[in-house]
Image: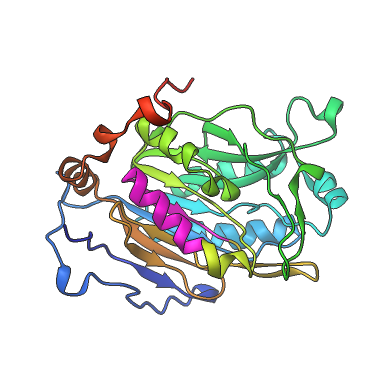
Amino acid sequence: MPPLQLLPLLLCPGLRIPRQALLSAQSRHRAMAVSSSGELPLVAVCQLTSTPDKQQNFKACSELVREAARLGACLAFLPEAFDFIARDPDETLRLSEPLGGNLLGEYTQLARECGLWLSLGGFHERGQDWAQTQKIYNCHVLLDNKGSIVATYRKTHLCDVEIPGQEPMCESSSTLPGPSLEPPINTPAGKIGLAVCYDMRFPELSLKLAQAGAEILTYPSAFGFVTGPAHWEVLLRARAIETQCYVVAAAQCGRHHDKRASYGHSMVVDPWGTVVARCSEGPGLCLAQIDLRYLQQLRQHLPVSQHRRPDLYGNLSHPLS
């Protein structure tokens, strides 16, 4: 079965918008299915370099979101830590805010003004237990085009790792793990399953979301320069292939401060496992169309979900709540 041909565009730093085709289906082109309106939904995947300056970060994000709206996207994805990347756990806690704080209010206004949905890939959230715990949640927030919060997912797998050649990570020093998964949410692009970065290393989560009806999986991230080249694309394509979902991964890139840098390479992967859009170096965005008819055809021709053997390795099929 041929992979899906989509329209990837690269928007370069400074929003001067020189465009280039990043990938094509080459000789394996196929006719794209179209909706009754004649167009497939378009999504924008934003790549940025967050710093400890929240207002500077908001300015960078708002420019990308406004450009996504101008180009006709119905949904824009921002990476993990779109709000800020601090120098240490104390600064992370000091800069964090509740969901009802000023910063998220600016993003709700941005969604309303631009008229598109926003996936805010990892907000440093002071939860209701902040006074007792003095720790935060890494919260993936989904806003609709009216600026309303339609879903929140708090990252369940925390990144406590020491990789030679890469800055050690101990996310649990400032962050609590989320207690549950979020059922997939209907959006103009399809049913979206929410996850964050390190979650992509746990296929059980992606399979659970797919079995609950997800058509698009999201992995907003901030990968390092050692794990990035080795694992980033491999993991994203594996999650797409095994679930037969689109995978959208908005990423941090470049040097955030003297203690941390991120790999970038934001991308969209189709259900066949083909990378159909990809950002190059530096801040910018890429665009991809989502073809749910193609997704359904692929699942019909290659019905792996019907061939699972829960009698051998357990059942993931009990409902999400």
Taking the image as shown, residue 296 lies to the left or right of residue 122, namely left
Most distant residue in the left direction: 31
Report x, y in % for residue 7: 28, 65
**Residue at 41% across, 79% down:** 18
Nearer to the camera, 35 or 220? 220
The residue nearer to you, when weighing 154 against 311, is 311
Q: Is residue 212 visible?
A: no
The picture places residue 296, in percent across and down from the top left corner, at 20, 42
Mark count: 0
Left or right position of 286 against 250:
left
The reply to whether the magenta stretch includes residue 17 is no
Rendering coords of residue 75 (x, y %): 41, 48
Q: Nearer the viewer, residue 261 or 314?
A: 314
In which quarter of the view is residue 316 placed?
A: top left
Q: Is residue 60 left or right of residue 53?
A: left
* Span colored in magenta: 232-251
Q: Residue at x 72, y 67 (%)?
A: 166
Magenta segment, prevailing SS (helix, strand or loop): helix
